[in-house]
């Protein structure tokens, strides 16, 4: 495990679609480093022989009966969207000339 | 105070009405919520019409169910169709979900009356309810102190007498720690026992819904109602709800209870004394009490603060300003996503998203997330070993009584340590309960935690009942 840098935090913020001010970046770097430093206690254990656990009780996937059930009401769902056009979610332009 | 069971019985016998109980709860909220900020939204119309339905059923000679007319508080990360649901985040302000959580449907089916939505740390990330975008909740026992978190609103609502039952969610202790700090009972059921459908996801392999109540019996009734398989949650156990009330008075005679050293390490002296006194109560009731050490539990906190943020960073990717909630307009899609998330999420949520993104990112995955998942295996094995020697484990719920507002807000690591005793059960998926057990040196309530193996709720509740009866008055 290596020590977390400001550049690392700036990179993960970009991946996570968050904008940080220089001041934010400074503070988050210190705080996240403290958590990761605490996690160094995990290095002391031998893990190679231990399988990872992703879920407490790994069970076979549950399959329901193949019957039609009612889904969500389309108008009710679209009514909660910030912008809608022709019964579709509307987002700013992605391709082509920006407005 | 009257228990939920007593209230429901008097409604079913016609001695009082659901409307009377609901009006009483709404009046208590109106009188007390200004000081406590336990509720973010009170659904007066919805509550009164649910109460009228229960009263009509009684009048028609029908049985409205085991929670007939009992007012219930819902943590505001439980979806309620048409009723505002925020997870205490600006990013969901004004959102009205198009569906209702399974637990809420089941409560309504049992005659309960949801009266409103309670405050929490934003997206259930926190241990004090100070991370809410809508201001902190205060501890009813001392308004200068936190109620714990993240289900602090439900804990405060129950402790102050606004409602007899609250629902919370517990990802690393978010039901048990606030229950302990507010002096009420709190249950984290076996993972998968209660459907998560309609619970706003934080860390999906750890999240579990459970009750906060004023008595162990009330928690048993509530859990019987909300538990059981739900086809809409693929992680829900494929078995019916356990019967808990019938075996509530089975006692602990002949059982072995282990006092776990790591569930007391670092606890304040008054907390340690209460745990020791609780062990004596169990011994007096016929249990054999042994002391054990489970060193792997010390790794729980580190593993949790990698796994939970990793899952959160993935779960919270859905808040992108496209389908629901906040949108901050910008010239292109990516800039809109960034502007929305930057404005909509609070500090702690951003911190955990970044931590999780880092733990999952190329080059660090094996060192952090992968390692934490292996620790999870080690921890589960260690618990299994302990349950080879003991039927139940006992320890502290939280290291101290309620701390002052602002005491830990600038030091995330200090805040995270509030959950050191509760986190292991979430990692293993096993059930745990906290029972009020006297008060600390400062006169504030404290709780004792009982832990059992997966699906051992009957035993856990029977032991909790013994502790409740033997707790200092």
Image: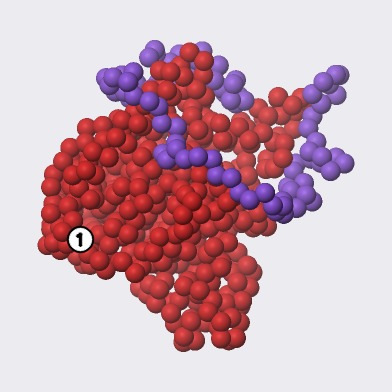
Chain colours: A purple, B red
- In-image side of B31 versus B179 (left or right): right
Q: Position of residue B464 (x, y in %)?
A: 27, 60
Q: Secondary structure at mark 1?
A: loop
Q: Mark 1: give few (<14), some (14-19) or many (20+) Cα within 10 Å.
A: many
Q: Residue at x 55, y 16 (%)?
A: A11
Chain at numbered mark 1: B
Residue occupied by mark 1: B252
Residue B126 visible in image = no
Foreground residue among B192 and B238? B238
Rendered location of residue B4, percent (x, y): 41, 71
Q: Check the image and report above or below for B288 versus B418.
A: below
- Compared across the picture, whether B365 is left or right of B374 comes to right
Vertical placement of residue A24 versus B19, above or below: above
Residue B288 in the image: above or below residue B332: below
Residue B378 in the image: state x and y as whole percent.
31, 30
Residue B267 lies in what quarter of the image? Answer: top left
Q: Is residue A98 above or below residue B50?
A: above
Residue B82, quarter of picture: bottom right
User: Which residue appears at 23% of the width and 48% of the height?
Assistant: B393
Q: Nearer the viewer, residue B334 or B135?
A: B334
């Amino acid at each position: 495990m290596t020590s977390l840098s400001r550049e690392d935090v700036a990179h993960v913020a970009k991946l996570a679609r968050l904008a940080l001010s220089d001041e934010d970046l400074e503070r988050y770097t210190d705080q996240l480093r403290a958590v990761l430093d605490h996690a160094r206690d995990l290095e002391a254990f031998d893990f190679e022989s231990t399988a990872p656990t992703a879920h407490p009780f790994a069970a076979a996937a549950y399959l329901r009966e193949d019957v039609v059930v009612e889904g969500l009401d389309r108008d009710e769902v679209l009514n909660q969207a910030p912008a809608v056009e022709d019964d579709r979610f509307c987002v700013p332009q992605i391709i082509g000339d920006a407005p | 105070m009257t228990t939920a069971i007593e209230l429901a019985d008097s409604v079913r016998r016609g001695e009082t009405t659901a409307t009377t109980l609901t009006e009483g709860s709404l009046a208590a909220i109106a009188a007390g919520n200004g000081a406590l900020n336990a509720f973010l939204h009170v659904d007066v119309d919805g509550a009164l019409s649910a109460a009228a339905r229960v009263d009509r059923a009684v009048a028609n000679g029908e049985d409205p169910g085991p929670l007939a007319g009992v007012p219930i508080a819902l943590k505001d990360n439980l979806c309620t169709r048409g009723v505002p649901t925020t997870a205490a985040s600006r990013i969901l302000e004004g959102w009205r979900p198009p569906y209702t959580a399974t637990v809420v449907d089941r409560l309504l089916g049992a005659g309960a009356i949801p009266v409103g939505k309670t405050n929490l740390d934003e997206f259930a990330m926190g241990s004090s309810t100070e991370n809410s975008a809508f201001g902190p909740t205060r501890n009813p026992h001392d308004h200068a102190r936190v109620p714990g978190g993240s289900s602090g609103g439900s804990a405060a609502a129950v402790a102050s007498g606004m409602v007899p039952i609250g629902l919370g969610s517990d990802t690393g202790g978010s039901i048990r720690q606030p229950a302990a700090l507010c002096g009420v009972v709190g249950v984290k059921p076996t993972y998968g026992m209660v459907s998560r459908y309609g619970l706003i996801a934080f860390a999906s392999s750890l999240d579990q819904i459970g009750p906060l109540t004023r008595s162990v019996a009330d928690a048993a009734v509530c859990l019987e109602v909300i538990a059981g398989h739900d086809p809409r949650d693929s992680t829900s156990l494929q078995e019916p709800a356990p019967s808990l009330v019938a075996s509530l008075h089975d006692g602990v005679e002949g059982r072995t209870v282990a006092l776990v050293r790591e569930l007391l390490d670092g606890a304040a002296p008054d907390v340690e004394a209460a745990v020791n006194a609780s062990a004596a109560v169990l011994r007096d009731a016929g249990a054999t009490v042994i002391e054990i050490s489970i060193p792997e539990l010390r790794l729980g906190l580190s593993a949790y603060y990698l796994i939970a943020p990793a899952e959160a960073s993935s779960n919270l990717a859905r808040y992108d300003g496209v389908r629901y909630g906040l949108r901050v307009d910008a010239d292109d899609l990516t800039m809109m996503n960034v502007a929305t998330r930057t404005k909509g999420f609070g500090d702690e949520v951003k911190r955990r998203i970044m931590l999780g993104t880092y733990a999952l990112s190329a080059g660090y995955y094996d060192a952090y997330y992968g390692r934490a998942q292996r620790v999870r295996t080690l921890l589960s094995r260690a618990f299994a070993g302990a349950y080879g020697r003991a039927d139940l484990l006992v320890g502290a719920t939280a290291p101290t009584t309620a701390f002052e507002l602002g005491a830990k807000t600038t030091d995330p690591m200090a805040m995270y340590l509030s959950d050191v005793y509760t986190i292991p059960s979430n990692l293993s998926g096993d059930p745990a309960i906290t029972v009020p057990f006297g008060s600390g040196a400062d006169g504030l309530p404290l709780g004792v935690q009982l832990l059992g193996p997966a699906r051992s709720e009957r035993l856990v509740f029977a032991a909790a009942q013994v502790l409740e009866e033997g707790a200092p008055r």
